[in-house]
Amino acid sequence: MRLMMLIALLALMKLLGDLGLESTEDTGHHAAMAFGFMILAGTVFADWARHLTLPRITGYLLAGVFCGPGVLGMLDAEVVSHLKIFDRTALFLIAFGAGAELRVDSLKQQWKLIVTSSFFQLTLGWAVAFSAFWLVRPYVPFLEGLGGGATVALLALVAMISVAKSPAETVAVIVETGAKGPMRDYVLGVTILMDVLIILAFTLLRQISLPVLGAGDVESHLLHEIVLMITSIAVGAGSGGLLILWMRHRREHLPLVLLAYCLLMVRLCADFHLESLLVAVGAGFVICNFSDKGEKLLHSLEAVSLPIFLVFFGITGAGLDIEALKKLWLLALFYVVVRMFAKWLSNRTATTLLRAPKAVVTHGWKGFLGQAGVSLGFAAIIAEVVPLQGGMVKEMIIAAVLVNQLVGPVLFKKGLEKAGEIGKE
Amino acid sequence: MHSVYVILILALVVLLAQTHTARHMRLPKPLRPAVAGGLGYLLLGWAGGPQVTGLIGFEALSDLDPLFNLAIGWVGLLLGLQLKIADLKQITPREVTGSLLHFLVVSGLAFAGLFPLFLKIAPADALGASLILSLIAGASSPTFVLLIEGKDMAREAAGRRMLLYANLSCLYAVLFNGLVVVIFFPQPDLAGWLPAAPLRVLFSIGLAAVLAFLFHFFMSHGAANRRLALLLIGMMVFCGGVAAVTQVPPLFLNLLVGAWLVNQARHGNRLYHFLVVYERPLFLTLIVVAGLVWEPGPGLLPALAAFVVLRTLAIGLARQADNRLWPAASGKKGAGQGVPLLTLLPQGGVALAIAISQWQQHTAGRELIPAVAVPAVLLFALLAGFGSRGDGKKDEG
């Protein structure tokens, strides 16, 4: 019945368009209608996803894809740009939640495992992806016409992109399922550490690779990135301290204060080129581990989590390009499979070496499959400096991200179920 | 400086100043309702807006359009969700007639005074501005009335009746505003397609009915709190978009949708409680926006003075007439004793929401309406505060 209602709402929107009621000056009005439709569609899709024992965010993503340029075309690039402020704020809140979920106690217990696994993902995972693409290089269109050195350089960057993962998906699945246990802590820890390491590793690799690809002057400085990261964490921790002070003196309207804080931080990060994810994680971590306000904060965050997830994943879904998947589906599929194998192998190796709990050894890799913003950002950098080959790389990554976005949360939820961490008190 | 910094820094200053004044300063009694009702936020918006510092331009406001739609939709839906048929049946025909007459007298007198004045000040906008402002004049704020008069008011028969009048005045203002806009200031394409005004009215009501019918099916599955909250947000944003495209006032549309949902949808009655919980932040958003869009023009002073004087007189007259027509209810010794004549003077969210939605959507009186309505809300809170019996400590919202 609700599908019929969605179709009826669509018909209504079409009717209003056909009546010529489009001469209003602001395209934002149409954006509002489309955005409202996406939220309603998101609730329906999320319900269906739940019936199929899939995570809700898969429903939100599908609702975004459904409303996006590939299917209905309601949320096109212009409309999505109108919603950017909500998207960024939502991402910040998600990362804030991730920091709040990290506990010093569990990190102390698992730090060796987390560091080792991150190291293996960066090295072994990268090597697997690089080798696989190297083996099939005659069939890879974006390597055509490149010399030996350039091929190695470009593949090195592509392999590094395959290592990146999406922290937002990890947090969303954890919050939605309420999972508790070693696998949850492990995946969360590795995800956040990897978020730092991958940016540094990519920057380093970019400095080495791009001159080989003939990109000329490369504006990328490892030291600069390191300073920015440290500054980001410091700003996050400092602002977290200020929030603790605020919560001690004023108790009312905490969700509102949090929202205002996030808006301010998102703006600050954009203006000072700080890594907003690290700022948010730092703030959440400080509040939950160095004050007694953690539970209160998490409660406030949970109260607003559903709209945040819907907005973020809906807009992400709308930004996914089905056309790219249609064009490069075989290559994208190869990338997805190779990446999956690389994640499995690096997780298996690290966890077996350190004798991690069985659930982590068997199912841990499922938490590292989701991929989103960071990967797309890296692909965009390559496309900018080497437009011809980089353009194709970007299309492949966009297509693969679409698959990974849909597969990642499902497998992670299943993994948490199998590990027996869902429904634990 | 970016608008986000400005808003947040000023909001912090206002919040701290409010806390300080509440804790350490004993404000004069007449000022308390205005301060508690968000005076600081109004000044905050005005100070950061294009008229004073210019730190936030009108262009920057369009980025936050969905948020304004949400705040305005919230007011409309909240009103609609109070229209449960079972509750409405408890209102006597005499109360309905009395409140309607009260509203019409106030609005009619305001229009009679404002229209000739506006013909001189702003001839092009005279009809639109005076019509909408006279409807705004008819709306009183039940929350502010309670805030100013104190909780004891609800224990008196006449006090209860005045609260009912205030509630109903908001309803009339939104309904008449919807009809006036659809009849006199329709969206050009809609006017071309449906030249007859009654047909446009039917179209608008039909549109709301269709939306409400569709939304009610979304609510038939699952009643988890967060899911309902999501549906509410989706509905209001969608309604805001439809209202903007068709130029049917969003308050009107949301009110009709709310009225349907509370009577027909499975979890309709729970929606009201959600809206009340989140009302305060959205009310404050509305006040900040009202401050931002306030644009004093050359004719503001006479227009504002006329509006305030006319409305005050009209409310006094209407109340006198009401007392004479139904003396048993309010004139009897002990029943209406002590309820001041100008009890219905304070205005609140509905007046601001109508003014802002006019500013957002329509060209007729676009600047003039908020220019007059916004400071008037403040002045009425101060005026009412002088004759109040309450302590002004209850929070608005």
Image (cartoon, helix red, strand yellow):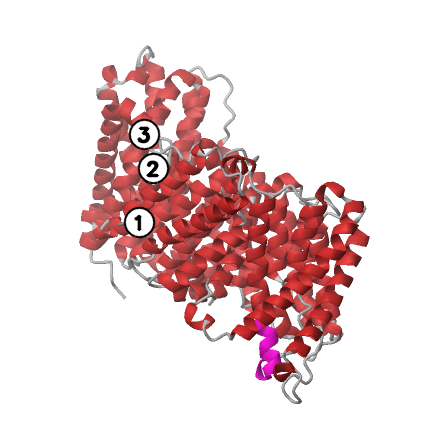
| Dot 3 alpha-carbon crowd within 10 angstroms: few under 14, some 14 to 19, many 20 or more | some
Q: Residue at x 22, y 20 (%)?
A: A136
Q: Element at badge 1? A: helix
* Separation of residues labelled 2 and 1 (CA atoms): 14 Å
Q: Which dot, 1 or 3, sits closer to the camera?
A: 1
Q: Is residue B319 above or below residue A217?
A: below
Q: Tell me the subunit letter for badge 3.
A: A
Q: Position of residue A390 (x, y in %)?
A: 39, 21
Q: Is residue B358 above or below residue B314?
A: above
The amino acid type of the residue labelled 1 equals Val
Which contiguous range is marked in magenta? B152-164
Q: Residue at x 73, y 70 (%)?
A: B317
Of residue A224 and residue A248, the one placed in the foreground of this image is A248
Q: Residue furthest bottom?
A: B333
Q: Tell me the subunit letter for badge 2.
A: A
Residue B158 colored in magenta in the image:
yes
Of residue B264 and residue A184, the one placed in the foreground of this image is B264
Q: Residue at x 43, y 67 (%)?
A: B84
Of residue B54 and residue A30, the one placed in the foreground of this image is A30
Check if mark 2 and mark 1 are on a common chain: yes
- Please give left or right for residue B267 compared with residue B315 in the image: left
Q: Residue at x 32, y 30 (%)?
A: A322
Q: Tell me the subunit letter for badge 1.
A: A
> In this figure, which residue is indicated by the disc labeled 1?
A44
> In this figure, which residue is indicated by the disc labeled 2?
A65
Q: Which mark is residue A304?
A: none
* Separation of residues labelled 1 and 3 (CA atoms): 21 Å
The amino acid type of the residue labelled 2 equals Val
Q: Position of residue B60 (x, y in %)?
A: 62, 41
Q: Position of residue A90 (x, y in %)?
A: 45, 48
> In this figure, which residue is indicated by the disc labeled 3?
A322
Q: Are marks 2 and 3 in contact (CB under 8 Å)?
A: yes
